[in-house]
Image (spheres, coloured by chain):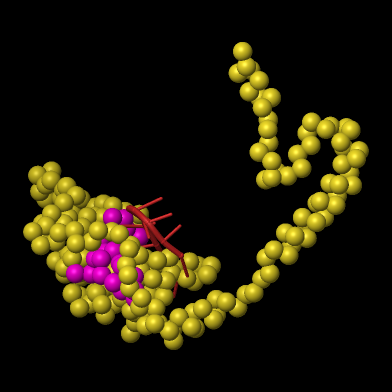
Chain colours: A yellow, B red
DNA sequence: GTTGAGCGTT
């Protein structure tokens, strides 16, 4: 079990995709599956990863079998704290094929279900159907006074440890070329000073480059 | 690896 992501898309023909945003980078599909499965039949959980680093991008896709269950999951899990992060759950707007999606469901280009012609009025009123209880309890503010860091002491240690494998010493090279630059400038300044004293810009970040000559036309 | 919102396969 829990082999989502490497099994490929099982069946997207009749599923409803949810987009889960703002998940932590350590949250995996296996962690999301039981959480979302509580509210309905989850067919697939997929977290797009960076093919170079293999790290998650901070969001995931959860595919439900039924729209009402998916809607329920959105209502229940949107804004919920998962792994110490407030996740955002919403219906996917685009499909894996970059196709348009309606309420998480892929709109098939085939005109097979176009039985009711244009009588439909598809307006973006997803949550309005449940606005009576689905008020925006989420103010989208990331201000949280939680300190659940101690909850991941063990796990966090491992993450930090493997990531801290590198120990570079930035600052040495800067000081290095800085000294070289200073010495070089000082040495050649003698000949350059007499050659083009006007262009003498000692520090590109030390002097505000008083190139007022460009504004000389403003005078009088 | 934050803020806005973000939209996808081995």
Q: Residue at x 19, y 49 (%)?
A: A124
On the picture, is A107 further left or further right than B1? left
For the view shown, which residue lies furthest in the bottom direction? A154
Residue A76 is situated, as x and y percent measured from the top left of the image, at: 19, 69
Residue A47 is situated, as x and y percent measured from the top left of the image, at: 38, 69
Q: How many marks?
A: 0
Q: Residue at x 75, y 39 (%)?
A: A201
Q: Is A218 in the magenta?
A: no
Q: Which image quadrant is residue A162 in?
A: bottom right
Residue A92 vs A53, above or below: the answer is: above
- In the image, A38 versus A176, the foreground residue is A176
Residue A31 vs A133, above or below: the answer is: below
Q: Which image quadrant is residue B9 in?
A: bottom left
- In the image, A100 versus A193, the foreground residue is A193
Residue A134 vs A124, above or below: the answer is: below
Residue A26 is situated, as x and y percent measured from the top left of the image, at: 41, 75
- In the image, A59 versus A102, the foreground residue is A59
Magenta segment: A76-96
Residue A175 is situated, as x and y percent measured from the top left of the image, at: 75, 60
Residue A10 visible (yes or no): no
Q: Residue at x 88, y 32 (%)?
A: A195
Name the quadrant of the N terminus of chain A.
bottom left
Q: Residue at x 66, y 38 (%)?
A: A208
């Amino acid at each position: 079990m829990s082999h989502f992501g490497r099994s490929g898309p099982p069946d997207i023909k009749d599923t409803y995709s949810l987009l889960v945003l703002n998940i932590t980078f350590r949250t995996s599909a296996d962690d999301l599956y039981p959480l979302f499965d509580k509210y309905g039949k989850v067919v697939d959980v997929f977290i797009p990863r960076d093919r170079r680093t293999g790290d998650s991008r901070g969001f995931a896709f959860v595919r439900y079998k039924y729209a009402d269950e998916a809607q329920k999951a959105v209502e229940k899990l949107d804004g919920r704290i998962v792994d110490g992060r407030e996740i955002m759950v919403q219906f996917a707007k685009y499909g894996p094929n970059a196709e348009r999606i309606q309420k998480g469901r892929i709109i098939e280009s085939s005109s097979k279900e176009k039985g009711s012609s244009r009588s439909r009025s598809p307006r973006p009123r997803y949550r309005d159907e449940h606005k009576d209880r689905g008020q925006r309890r989420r103010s989208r503010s990331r201000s949280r006074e939680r300190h659940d860091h101690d909850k991941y002491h063990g796990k966090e240690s491992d993450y930090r440890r493997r990531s801290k494998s590198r120990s570079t010493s930035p600052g040495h090279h800067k000081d290095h070329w800085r000294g070289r630059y200073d010495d070089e400038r000082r040495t050649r300044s003698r000949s350059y000073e007499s050659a083009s004293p006007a262009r003498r810009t000692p520090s590109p970040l030390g002097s505000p480059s008083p190139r007022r000559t460009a504004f000389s036309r403003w005078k009088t």
